[in-house]
Image: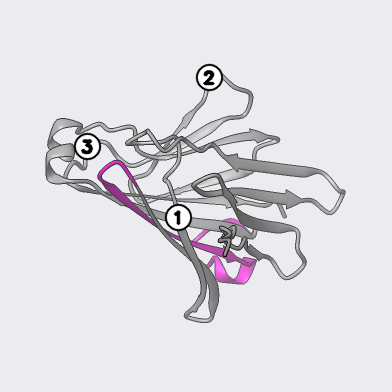
Amino acid sequence: MSSSISTPPAHQLQTENGSLQIRFEWQQDRYAHIVRWQSETGEVAEARSVEGSSDQDWPASPALQQLSTETIEGVPTILGVGCAGSSHFSVSVQVLEKADAEESDSESPRVRFDWAVRMSASDAKEHPVANLGTQYAAENMLATSLLGQTQSVRDSDSDGGIRFVPDQSAGGPTRQWSYDLLGAT
């Protein structure tokens, strides 16, 4: 009897007209994601997560090994969990149409990311400024909006790269960061 290993399914969300979408696909031992926006004129902007490897305690982007798509308060939501080293990651991802983005001044649809990591107490003490965050490689990068105490850092080594990181002064074993990637109106 032979056993086969199946590839976990992809998960995708998009605006009603399909102009802004996020897709998570399995890549070796974790999910990677891409956010894609297409304007009315056909111009395309993309941001691809930069992933790490299984031997990194804090990869370039959180290692997600399990995803589910649920409806939360009427909004389709991708929920994910995973681990790297002794840290446990989680994420909630939603595509918000213009009307759903009430707390923002922007009229653009957006993909909202809410990340968290739980580090061991010893890791949090030993590495108070751990390499936590989510990194993207991008051409024609989407606009961004930071939420809470999240910071962004432009990648000077690559064209259009950006990294979203939690406020390093927060400390403690649980760190959070949140941001929106926006399509244009």
177 or 86: which is nearer to us? 86
Query: Which of disc 1 and disc 3 is earlier in sequence?
Result: 1
Q: Quadrant of residue 20?
A: bottom right
The residue carrying mark 2 is 156
Q: Is residue 179 above or below residue 158?
A: below
Residue drawn at point x = 54 percent, y = 36 percent? 50
Residue drawn at point x = 50 percent, y = 69 percent? 68
State the mark number for residue 65. Answer: 1
Query: Which of disc 2 and disc 1 is earlier in sequence?
Result: 1
Question: Badge 3 local density, few (<14 within 10 Å), some, or many (20+)?
Answer: few
In the rendered image, the residue lying farthest to the top is 157
Residue type at the position of mark 3: Ser
> Element at badge 1?
loop
50 or 7: which is nearer to us? 7
Query: Which of disc 3 and disc 2 is earlier in sequence?
Result: 2
Q: In this view, does 156 lie above or below 85?
A: above
Residue type at the position of mark 2: Ser
Residue type at the position of mark 1: Gln
Please state the extent of the stretch shown in magenta in the rendering.
Answer: 84-107
The residue carrying mark 3 is 169
Would you say residue 61 sits in the magenta stretch? no
Badges 1 and 2: C-beta atoms under 8 Å apart?
A: no
Would you say residue 89 sits in the magenta stretch? yes
Give the number of marks.
Answer: 3
